[in-house]
Image (cartoon, helix red, strand yellow):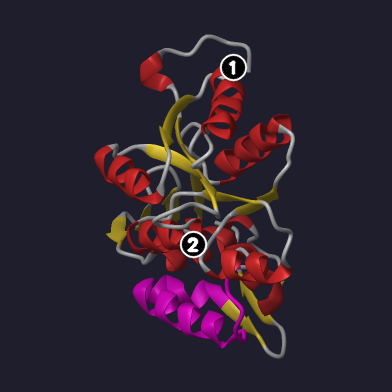
């Protein structure tokens, strides 16, 4: 990552921690990796910054903070945004982790941690969420998905999908021709943040099929297992 990046191109990361020493440690490593870093010392300040700055690509969030803790900040952000969130915690408690994933946390790091590991996790998440990648277009069988712009075109017509429907369709297209179990879909599309039964997938597939019109027939049900997107060679 040693290349020069203009300030305009730098990816913005919000670091929220009430310990200034911890913020400085994280900031120094991120700045070295050419990220633009915003800092907040408490939850209230974090929310103000989050709504003020429209293009924050990722949030690093400490759990234990006065006034408004990390869980509360996470809930508030999730009400408006799917921005990736990495939680920092001093406790390695499984219940905390489950709560974090249920709230839609992308990654969980226990203190003390290596800043290099944190930067590596941030890189991986940003690659996964396509924040840093150049525009990526997926297409097959008349379906075109622009992951960067979050747009879906079917036979040249734009189709309005919810966030999860979009993720589900992109996952099907990326894995076209492959039989996918409900468990696999749940783990990849819901990213471990859903602890219910697999019926939620069936509901989403049903809605997705109806929004896709005739192309909905491309999503085949594999009884007793899951689904497969099958595209006949054009």
Residue 209 colored in magenta in the image: yes
Task: Residue 218: give x, y in percent of width and height.
Answer: 53, 72
Q: Quadrant of the N terminus?
A: top right
Q: Nearer the viewer, residue 145 or 28?
A: 28
Apparent side of residue 226 relative to residue 4 in the rendered image (left or right): right
Taking the spot 60% from the left edge, 58% from the top edge, the residue there is 233
Q: Quadrant of the C terminus?
A: bottom right
In the image, which disc is placed on residue 212?
none
Classify mark 2: residues with Cα within 10 Å, few (<14), some (14-19) or many (20+).
many
The residue that mark 2 highlights is 71
- Residue 32 bears which disc, if any? 1
Q: Which residues are magenta?
A: 193-219
x, y percent for residue 119: 65, 32
Q: Residue at x 58, y 64 (%)?
A: 100
Q: Earlier in the sequence, mark 1 or mark 2?
A: 1
| Image spot of residue 154 (x, y percent) | 37, 60
- SS for dot 2: helix
Q: Is residue 205 above or below residue 72?
A: below
């Amino acid at each position: 990552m040693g290349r020069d990046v203009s300030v305009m191109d730098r990816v913005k990361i919000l670091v929220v921690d009430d310990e200034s020493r911890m913020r400085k440690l994280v900031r120094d490593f991120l700045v070295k990796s050419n990220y633009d870093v915003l800092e907040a010392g408490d939850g209230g300040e974090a929310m103000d910054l989050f709504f003020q700055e429209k293009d924050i690509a990722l949030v690093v969030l400490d759990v234990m903070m006065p006034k408004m803790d990390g869980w509360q900040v996470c809930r508030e952000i999730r009400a408006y945004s799917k921005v990736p969130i990495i939680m920092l915690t001093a406790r390695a408690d499984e219940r905390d982790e489950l709560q974090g994933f249920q709230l839609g946390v992308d990654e969980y790091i226990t203190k003390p941690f290596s800043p290099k590991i944190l930067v590596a996790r941030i890189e991986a998440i940003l690659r996964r969420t396509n924040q840093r990648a150049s525009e990526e277009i997926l297409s097959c069988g008349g379906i075109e998905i622009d992951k960067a712009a979050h747009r879906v075109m079917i036979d040249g017509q734009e189709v309005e999908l919810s966030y999860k429907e979009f993720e589900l369709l992109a996952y099907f297209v990326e894995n076209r021709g492959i039989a996918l179990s409900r468990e696999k879909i749940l783990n990849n599309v819901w990213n471990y943040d859903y602890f219910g039964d697999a019926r939620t997938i069936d509901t989403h597939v049903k809605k997705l099929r109806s929004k896709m019109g005739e192309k909905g027939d491309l999503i085949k049900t594999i009884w007793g297992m899951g689904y497969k997107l099958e595209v006949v060679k054009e």
